[in-house]
Amino acid sequence: MNIDSESDAYVSEDDVDLSRNKGKGKAKTTDKRKKDKAKRKPKDVQAYTWEANYTRSWDTVQEDEAGSLQGAVEDWIARGRHLSTAMMDRDMRPTRFGLTLQYAREFILEWFDQNPLGQMGVVGMRAGVGERIGELSGNPQDVLKAISDRHKLEPNGEPSLQNAIEMARNTMNHLPTHSSREILIIFGSLTTCDPGNIHDTLDECMKNKIRISVVALAAEMKICRELCDKTGGQFGVALNEGHFKDLLFELVPPPAQRAISRVNGAGATNPAADLMMMGFPTRLPESSPPTLCVCHSELKSDGFLCPRCLSKVCDVPTDCDVCGLMIVSSPHLARSYHHLFPVKPFVAM
């Protein structure tokens, strides 16, 4: 009876309090719910999902029988060598690989704008071999198409500087003697997996007068610096995204042609140049009847006619797919002439 009477009295007091001050009762109820929720909340809940990777991470490294951690550390290093792809690191956004593709597209357009008579090919380094991604071409659209499929270019394994340089060197063997041969390497790794002595490849590049430039995304490597110094190229380590673009676009202008001294030492002369055969095409208006182009086999109204075989091509500069003639326009030739004979330095009067 006593218990029931006390209970009845307690309830009646609460009812009186609620009727007098509803706000106070709501505050008490809210505080009680918070306490219950705090009791049910687990203590090991992570604020971010990535924190789970670092929960008791020291348990993954175990000592051996002698109490040493050297074996465990070597095992982790071996796993990193075989499974990691340096170009997928996120120290540059979104990744080194994604940013390199973006800057490569911009570089190709700018390079062909400044070097309209030049040709470019693309070689990839993946799984210890060199892969020819794009053939040597004077049409920027062909080069852009070669690197358009991102899934076919996904990094895998370790790079090989020697294999890539050998493939690029063999591709440029047929070029005339007056042309400048250059290799631009964007390197994101700290290792290179080569089948032989890379210094032999360096000697061949020096003999063929091939200029090698390297833009490193990780850190400076002695062999990369040596490749650039001995061939007359440029070397730089990208500090961030903006610096990476600056280093890349510094290589857009063609290199200066060095004069070769005569045997008797009297003066200097430029290297002997071969004559280049090229043609100026006839531009077709958009109102002309559609015909098939030889480059894509598509019906188009506008285009350019080859002056030798009258075949239709879509863009210039390019090489005619029928007769092989280099087709250029007069503005393209004028821009190349500007690089060959630059304006003299300004002299204040």
Image (tube, rainbow, N blue to C red):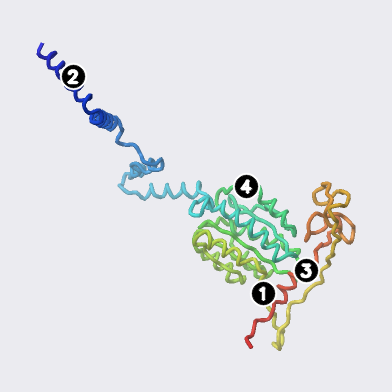
Q: Quadrant of residue 317?
A: bottom right
Q: Quadrant of residue 202?
A: bottom right
Distance from the alpha carbon under mark 2 to that under mark 1: 97 Å
Distance from the alpha carbon under mark 2 to that under mark 3: 99 Å
Q: Looking at the image, do the residues carrying marks 1 and 4 touch, with CB atoms under 8 Å apart?
A: no
User: Mark 1 = which residue?
Assistant: 256
Query: Which of marks 4 and 3 precedes in the sequence?
Result: 4
Label 1 neighbour load within 10 Å: few <14, some 14-19, many 20+: few
Depth check, mark 4 against mark 2: the one in front is: 2
Q: Amino acid at mark 1?
A: Ala
Q: Amino acid at mark 3?
A: Leu
Q: Amino acid at mark 2?
A: Val
In this view, the residue farthest toward the left is 2
Query: Which of marks 4 and 1 precedes in the sequence?
Result: 4
Distance from the alpha carbon under mark 3 to that under mark 4: 34 Å
Label 3 neighbour load within 10 Å: few <14, some 14-19, many 20+: some
Residue 298, x across and y down, in percent? 82, 46
Q: Is residue 9 above or below residue 145?
A: above
User: Mark 3 = which residue?
Assistant: 333
Depth check, mark 1 against mark 3: the one in front is: 3
Q: Residue at x 73, y 53 (%)?
A: 142
Label 2 neighbour load within 10 Å: few <14, some 14-19, many 20+: few
Query: Which of marks 3 and 2 precedes in the sequence?
Result: 2
Residue 125, x across and y down, in percent? 60, 54
Which of the two residues, 9 or 56, is positioned nearer the viewer here? 9
Q: Is residue 244 left or right of residue 308?
A: left
**Residue 11 disc label:** 2
Q: Is residue 311 above or below residue 264?
A: above
Residue 278, x across and y down, in percent? 83, 66
